[in-house]
Image: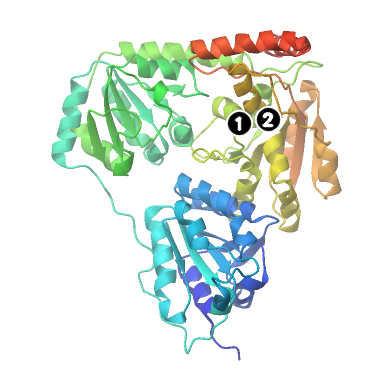
Amino acid sequence: MSKTKVADLLTDALKRAGVKRVYGIAGDSLNAVTESLRRDGGIEWIHTRHEEVAAFAAGAEAHLTGSLAVCAGSCGPGNLHLINGLYDCHRSRVPVLAIAAQIPSAEIGRNYFQETHPRNLFGECSHYCELVTSPEQLPGVFETAIRTAVAKSGVSVIVLPGDVANMALPKLPELSASLLPVASLVRPHDAQLDALARLLDGSARVTLLCGRGCFGAHAPLMRLAEALKSPIVHAFGGKEGVEWDNPYDVGMTGLIGFSSGYHAMMDCETLLMLGTDFPYRQFYPTDAKVAQVDLRAENLGRRCRLDLGLVGDVGATIEALLPRLAVKTDRAHLDGSLASYKRARGGLDELAVGKAGGIMHPQFVARTLSEAASEDAVITYDVGTPAIWVARYVHMNGKRRLIGSLNHGSMANAMPQAIGAQAAYPGRQVISFSGDGGFTMLMGDLLTLVQQRLPVKVVVLNNGTLGFVEMEMMAAGYLDTGVKLTNPDFAAMARGAGIFARRVEDPADLKAAMAEMLAHDGPALLDVVSARMELAMPPKVGMAQAAGFGLWLARAVINGRGTEIIDVARTNLIH
């Protein structure tokens, strides 16, 4: 009979925390851990092809479930590969535990093979990171790591040398009965709520800016908007929780937002920020009064000058605030903002069309995806132009979920996050809306869909360029450099890996191919060859951007690249 080992205590702690799976790549420094998981049989090992994918996948699972998710990497390069995905998890504030294996404990500090110092490496992307050197530290370190990740909604890292994981324990130590902390309900003091009510009552034009912290507070938020006759602008993170069934919605603001959202904020007398840390300071009003409600005090006033800051859960705060408010009757600000949104929405919808034999506009691809996806689909999306089209054209309904790399802004997040979403919800439709640049960066894990039998649907927006980077270059007046992508036929490649795939070049074929791909029982890929020169206009174009674009036009002509100007005009003027 095998002895109880440190790795067995870790397995027991993970099970007690409700962990169902661990994402990672095996290695000799992880042998005791993977063997313990195998013997126990209660936690599934999800074998990815890159540890970065494992971290992204764990983050997506945590995003959807709200529960602790786990990834693991072997010593040195193995756990170092986790770091970008863990940065995304930490900045997205989702509870993730990373198991970072370490070289033999007796060799630490001697420049041993594959030696790194994970406590230093992971310090900036975790709330807790601790090295285990002795069984006497346990179960304290394991429990603290789990509690910290859950309580602070972020990353914890356990650094575990392979020899320590393999150490025998006299007996399996008893874990605390209360391992997982229960979130407390936080609301501001009455005096602060009274002050906020006075501020709002004294303002004729109030606009609400809503972020991810509004998730789960849809009903009280609608009552607040009705009481204040306020338009609701949302940051990208607020889209999945705010946009649907919302008669006060006037769209997003920011670089990829709507002109209506921008003007609703600029024209207000008071801006009320709810659960958002929207980072782009140039999109905040300069003359309005600003109040902010956030669960994290460190977010208050970080982006703009505040007149009033309150710490509290958005839903609980609104419920306590509503009885204090005088219901407004003047709808002028709201109705004007809604009319502006209707015009902006109509203008964007006019761009999302496809004609037989014509240009494959990415707006049409995103709109087609939205119309074809199931009502409870999970849609992950890559950073860059795919995020723009999802923000503007994917419709939310209260059941669908969106996952992106909103704060960290990493490329290559969509398909890895789809892996975690599908592993957590095997019967749910999961779609990765991938850019060709992001997809090819971690393309090896397309094989994970086959090996793990994950029926993820991958839509590759194949425009042959790092599209958002190219637009930034054009806006700054630079000729595009280093952005062109020479891509294979992604559909043929996927079929070679045993994945159902279609390639579409004509807009007339898109809807049928999309439906066929989504209906396939198993992993599937749709390679959509789309327009390279599609522009995405921000809600506000400054003189610097206009001058920069003019400079790009001049440089393109001077350098004999006039055909690119024609392509831009043809792509963006013909819809």
Rendering coords of residue 180 (x, y %): 39, 64
Q: Determine the residue positioned at 61% across, 8% down.
A: 550
Q: Determine the residue positioned at 83% across, 36% down.
A: 488
- Residues 462 and 411: in front is 411
Rendering coords of residue 351 (x, y %): 63, 15
Query: Given the image, on which type of amino acid does mark 2 rest?
Result: Leu
Q: Determine the residue positioned at 28% across, 19% down.
A: 288
Rendering coords of residue 11 (x, y %): 53, 73
- Residues 234 and 558: in front is 558
Q: Vertical placement of 508 versus 25: above or below?
A: above
Contact, mark 1 vs mark 2 (Cβ under 8 Å): yes
Q: Dot 1 lies on which element?
A: loop
Rendering coords of residue 225 (x, y %): 32, 26
Query: Given the image, on which type of amino acid does mark 1 rest?
Result: Gly
Q: Quadrant of the C terminus?
A: top right
The residue identified by callout 2 is 466
Q: Vertical placement of 457 versus 469: above or below?
A: below
Say whether residue 344 is visible.
yes
Which residue ends up furthest to the bottom in the rendered image? 1
Q: Determine the residue positioned at 61% across, 91% down.
A: 1
The residue identified by callout 1 is 384
